[in-house]
Amino acid sequence: MKFSVEKLVQGSCRLGVLRDVGKLKNQTVETPFCLLYTRGGSVPNLSNDTLGYVQDLPPVALMPLNVLAEHHETVQEYGKGIAEFTVMKDFLVCCTMQDPCTAAPSGYNDKTSVALWGRSGKMKVDPELFVKVQEAFQPDWFQCLGDADTCKTSSKKRTKKAVDNTLNFLDEILSKRKSSQTLQKMALFGSIGGGFSQFERERSAKETVARNVEGFALEGFQNDGEEFCQFGDKDFVDILSLTLKHLPEDKPRMMCAVLRPDVVLQAVRAGIDIFDTSYAYAATEKGHALVFDYNYHTPSEEVKDSDETKMSTPATESGFTINLGDKKYRDDFGPLLAGCKCFTCKTNTRAYINHLNNVTELQQGILLMIHNLHHYLGFFSALRQSLREDKFDQLEALIAQQKPHSPDR
Ligand SMILES: [Zn+2]
């Protein structure tokens, strides 16, 4: 994997390009971009067929190990890796440790292993087992085994231990990689932890940079699977910015978490390149549709008859989403979002989704997921465009106007 920053905007926002990622030898992936969030090897709510309704899908699927690791022996026997084994064979695969949407119970990691929580309970993963899992799964890149069991209230002792454990795991896995041809083909991202301790974050960053890794995964800010609402606070932005200053410019930085659009922009401003689509799934699970406006062009800048979606955000509400389960949408025969070009908005109404919500129909999850994925990916496309056009400030101001009063919207 090769990475280069093509343009640096306002000192820290990076418009970059990933090259030579796994089997995508002659293609490039522009950053900032989103990995396609999956759970148990598929996009939640969508089959291969219904996933086809979403245009411009990212080329890389995010596969957290917590659910999948317990199946590594079956995948090993199958012999063709996790992408072929699941329905994601047209995608590259990035394996990370924890599912951004699932709470990882605290207090189960130690200096020899990390606890993963799958469908059949806890699985202790040490470096040896971790290497076996990666050899069976054959992802195109993976996040190294790391202890991310920290949050804002973690003690100094726990935070230091988590960083020590993570560095020791990295050393052991780098040593095992020397004798594994399978692992040598994959890009390895070192985990940078340290909770909300600036000292530990900087130590984690400096020590990880000194090792032979192809990129960095920022984690350990929150371990309860909730949206990172407090990521809007100053502590997070300051710590993230200071941490990223220690990382080399020519290696990508990934942060997989349920991130609202305003927090994504803060992370991009700090220098993060790779995100994931778990926010679209988290909204779908609540019966919410993403409706925030990301068309940052002023009316005079808009090209007439362009293909660009003209979105309309409900003027009376704040927030990035609307709750389609609310009875006020019972007789609303408009699309989920006016101007949206997704399959769901072209063929369905808010009233219909509201009806499906009331009868707890599975189809609601499918239709909402198609719209929410389309919208979140569209936001990332607008984000890259804003960096290209030097209009990141305009996008930031537009998103800030829509920031919710209530944290879950
Ligand atoms: Zn739509």
Image: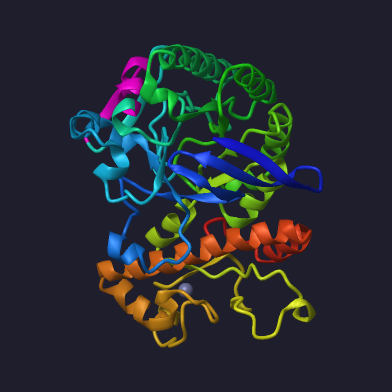
User: Is residue 61 visible to us here?
Assistant: yes
Please, is residue 279 above or below residue 71 in the view? below
User: Is residue 405 visible to us here?
Assistant: no
Please, is residue 223 above or below residue 314 in the view? above
Please, is residue 341 above or below residue 4 in the view? below
Q: Is residue 111 left or right of residue 81?
A: right
Along the line of sight, the residue nearer the viewer: 52 or 291: 52
Q: Is residue 247 left or right of residue 86?
A: right
Along the line of sight, the residue nearer the viewer: 331 or 136: 136
Along the line of sight, the residue nearer the viewer: 315 or 84: 84
The x and y percentages for residue 358 are: 30, 74
Residue 3: image quadrant is: top right
Q: Which stretch did the figure color magenta?
A: 120-134
The x and y percentages for residue 40 are: 29, 44
From the image, which quarter does the C terminus lie in? bottom right
From the image, which quarter does the N terminus lie in? top right
Residue 307: image quadrant is: bottom right
> Seen from this angle, which residue lies furthest right?
10
Q: What is the number of callouts on the image?
A: 0
Is residue 393 a member of the stretch shown in magenta? Answer: no
Which residue shows up at 65% across the image and 85% down it?
305
> Seen from this angle, which residue lies furthest front?
26
The x and y percentages for residue 115 are: 35, 25
Along the line of sight, the residue nearer the viewer: 284 or 158: 284
Residue 178: image quadrant is: top left
The x and y percentages for residue 275 are: 54, 46
Which residue shows up at 71% across the image and 33% down it?
249
